[in-house]
Image: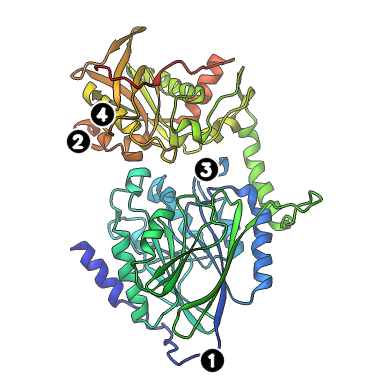
Amino acid sequence: MKKKMLLLFLTTLILCTLPPANTSARTKEVSFTIIHTNDTHSHLEQMPRLITVINSIRAEHKNTLLLNAGDVFIGTLYFSQFKGLASIPFMNKLKYDAMTFGNHEFDLKSVTLADFIKRADFPFVSSNIDFSADQLLEPLFVRKITANPQPGKIYPAIIKKVDDELVGIFGLTTEETPLISQPNQDLIFEDALIMAKKTAAQLEHLGVNKIIALSHLGFEEDQKLAPIVKGIDIIVGGHSHTKLEEPTVIYNGKDPVLIVQTGENAAYVGELSVSFDENGMIKKWNGSLLDVQAKDSKGNYKYEEDAWAKKQLSEADQELVELLQETVGYSLIPLNGAREDVRREETNLGNLIADSILKKANEVVPTQIAFQNSGGIRASIPEGKVVMRDVMAALPFSNTLSIVDITGLQLKEILEHSVSQLNGNTGQFLQVSGIRFTFNPQLPTGKRVQSVRVNDGGHYELLNPSKIYTAAVNSYLAGGGEGYDIFKRKKVNENIIETPFLDYEMLADYLKEHSPVAPRTEGRIQEVFTNEEL
């Protein structure tokens, strides 16, 4: 019923200020340029030159739209300290036309996202999230497709007038957000394909025949969407961090659909120039990525730093200086947090983090095991003096410690999920403390874990499926993040102990107490190619 009511609102409550569609045949092409960013992940250090890049594109083209496909949140110390609000002045200065939500916009619940939205001087588009039961976000959601969007509000779609023509823009967010982020439970992430079809049809019904999907679904899903959703002309994508040097073209019947995406971390700005015929079909296009840090043959930066942005960044940096420069320890060796390693194998930094979690948990209650999802480890730590900047770069999400009782059988289930996808693209692979286990990657998913041994007073004992073990996890995993639904099951969830201890503070405290450190990989997680009995 809730979905039907939402669709009814989207279909019927259209602003009376919507301009009439221009249905007369045109004698000239309709052309404009889309400037796009995605998955910038709070990399504000790029902003001084990124602003120059965007301003240079605008100077070259008369008609432009500036769009963001989500995941402004999470990824650097700027987010850890300012919770997204440090990005707002830069985005407001750039005058974005619209942004959709990435999964990471929900990492710190609705309270942080609502504050971000209220401070924005631009609108947001979201067609497949039902905000109606969320007390903080529902007041910001306007159940209307409008040609007069207001800043700091969320719409299912908006209509922009470009070169005297109507251009529709609607937003899509991955349905996996409840699995990989921590949205409020009152939010409903609806089927993206169904809502894309319905929203595009509503825009066409309003006389709009140039439609942009602002998508945080990932490149693979965008490619599935393009040939089956009637009306979409362009997909400005995000989520998969795919660097598309030029548009990917997929045909929906005879109509080309262009898919663009810029990669990650504000390293590139996308530029897509398109020309439509009078029927709203794309006839010409030219798309590319502009390297924000590009240099000429002499090694000079191609784009100067914007003076205002440089000053703004300096002010943000000053607030971080004292915190970031605090020495927390010393490492005798490099600590490996490289994405391609932590997401598929044991690393020394993974071990150190898991050990710090286990130590802090034992100060609360006796605890045998600790897990750290590899997706939460975002940087390596160099050999030598370790400062808070290094720690917070490695653990930028500010997750808190949770403690839970699980059975041996549930522990094996958790480990099976950990090794179910070993392509390096997912963050569910666990770094561990207090256990040693082996797995055979050649076996079917769900049957890969071969042996599990749990530390019992210094001796590793074979897993007892019926025994109760106490495990320490971060709040992200405790909420079911990375697909660990087991922690959301009633019998598990009802006994979770939540604490205020932050992950980066636990690691910093551990380094202060144990430095100098020189953690090694020690066979906590081993690949085997023979079957063993549990």
Location of mark 4 (residue): 447
Q: Quadrant of residue 228?
A: bottom left
Residue 352: percent from left, percent from top: 48, 21
384 or 82, nearer to the observer: 384
Circle nearer the N terminus (2, 4):
4
SS at badge 1: loop
Q: Amino acid at mark 1?
A: Thr
Where does the C terminus fall, quadrant-wise?
A: top left
Q: Are marks 3 and 1 in contact (CB under 8 Å)?
A: no
Q: Quadrant of residue 7?
A: bottom left
Disc 3 or 1, which lies upstream in sequence? 1
The disc, 3 or 4, on the residue closer to the chain's N-terminal end is 3
Element under label 2? helix
Q: Nearer the viewer, mark 3 or mark 4?
A: 4
Q: CA distance from mark 3 to mark 2?
A: 32 Å
Judge the density around disc 4: few (<14), some (14-19), many (≥20) Cα neighbours within 10 Å: some
The numbered mark at residue 176 is none
Distance of label 3 from label 1 (alpha carbons): 48 Å
Q: Residue under label 3, please give it.
A: 75
Residue at left offset 30%, top offset 53%: 187
Q: Identity of the amino acid at label 2? A: Lys
Between the residue at mark 1 and the residue at mark 4, the CA separation in whole angstroms equals 64 Å
Q: Position of residue 457 (x, y in %)?
A: 34, 7
Q: Are marks 3 and 4 in contact (CB under 8 Å)?
A: no
Classify mark 3: residues with Cα within 10 Å, few (<14), some (14-19) or many (20+): many
Q: Would you name the residue on which mark 1 appears? A: 27
Q: Amino acid at mark 3?
A: Gly
Q: Earlier in the sequence, mark 1 or mark 4?
A: 1
Mark identifier at residue 490 = 2
Q: Is residue 241 above or below residue 333?
A: below
Q: What is the quadrant of the N terminus in the image?
A: bottom left
Q: Secondary structure at mark 4?
A: loop
